Image (cartoon, helix red, strand yellow):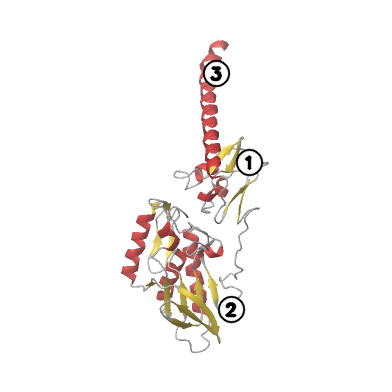
Amino acid sequence: MDALTYLVYGLPCAALLLWQLRRRRRLEQRSRAAHGRTGAAEPASLHPLIDPARCIGCGSCLKACPEQAHHTVLGIVDGRAQLVSPGDCIGHGACRQACPVDAITLVFGSERRGVDIPVVTPQFESTVPGMFIAGELGGMGLIRNALEQGRQAVESIARRPRVGDQPLDLVIVGAGPAGFAAALTAKAKSLRCVTLEQESLGGAVFQYPRGKLVMTAPATVPLLGKVNFRQTSKEALLQFWQEAERKTGVRINYRERVEDIVREGAGFVVKTNRASYVTRSVLLAIGRRGTPRKLGVPGEELPKVV
């Protein structure tokens, strides 16, 4: 009877263990292959740092990563979780929340590539009085956070007393997630505001690959309320924003590139390729990818070079 019991219960357990070991081996093979293809890349912004001494290799972080379905961002190597495709990580941070042993911390930059994060106050004001920073430029690439920062920065600007006789209260540079939320907030607060965008609505999101998964958490947007997008494509999100732009009547000056910002009295003069704007405050929501620095070498203008 005991032998039969062991047989009845032992065989399924052994089969399950064998299946799990083979599945784990395939996962490690895929992780090593992905790391071999992209391991030299450096993370663009916020990304996980995994402590191998604490990691138990459970794979919870892989399941939690919203990008994992489209990119092998995280993998298992030698029984431990590892960031195998750093260039595909865009800083959702869901992996840290999912880790049951707190083996993951979120950091900026790396040993080989540092990332300079602007120093800002809790109101997103920089060390230059009247100059505010929100979104990816401030180190936070997640769309939900960028929307929230753009809103909070403009609410802070709206509370400031008006000093001087500048024609404008605010110039917003960039119409990505942070800039668009800022423009909607400025309209809701009846601020005298101009929003400048050198390309198209969406900023860095507009430049994402076709079909890329974005907006993995709900957010509250001024004049629109709560946006319940959890997982949607780049195209669907841009279409929603374009409809919001039309519905709210917010105005954005497209194809207008900022060339210089000069302090003038208690405010600033923002010079573009079309005009100059005198304002008491400036919000930089330009991201980190809009106008990359060039190396000045032959071939860098080819379409295959990114």
Q: Is residue 242 above or below residue 208?
A: below
Q: Residues within 10 Å of mark 1 (few under 14, many from 20)?
A: some
Q: Where does the N terminus fall, quadrant-wise?
A: top right
Camera-nearest label, 2 or 3? 2
Relative depth, front residue between 276 and 12: 276
Kind of residue at disc 2: Pro
Q: In this view, which residue lies farthest toward the front?
A: 298
Percent position of residue 198, x then y: 42, 69
| Mark 1 touches mark 3? (CB < 8 Å) | no
Marks 1 and 3 sit apart, C-alpha to C-alpha, by 29 Å
Percent of width and height locating residue 125:
57, 73
Residue 168: give x, y in percent of width and height.
45, 83
Secondary structure type for disc 3? helix
- Residue that numbered label 3 is attached to: 10
Separation of disc 1 and disc 2 at Cα? 44 Å
Kind of residue at disc 3: Gly
Q: Where is mark 2, residue-wise?
A: 129
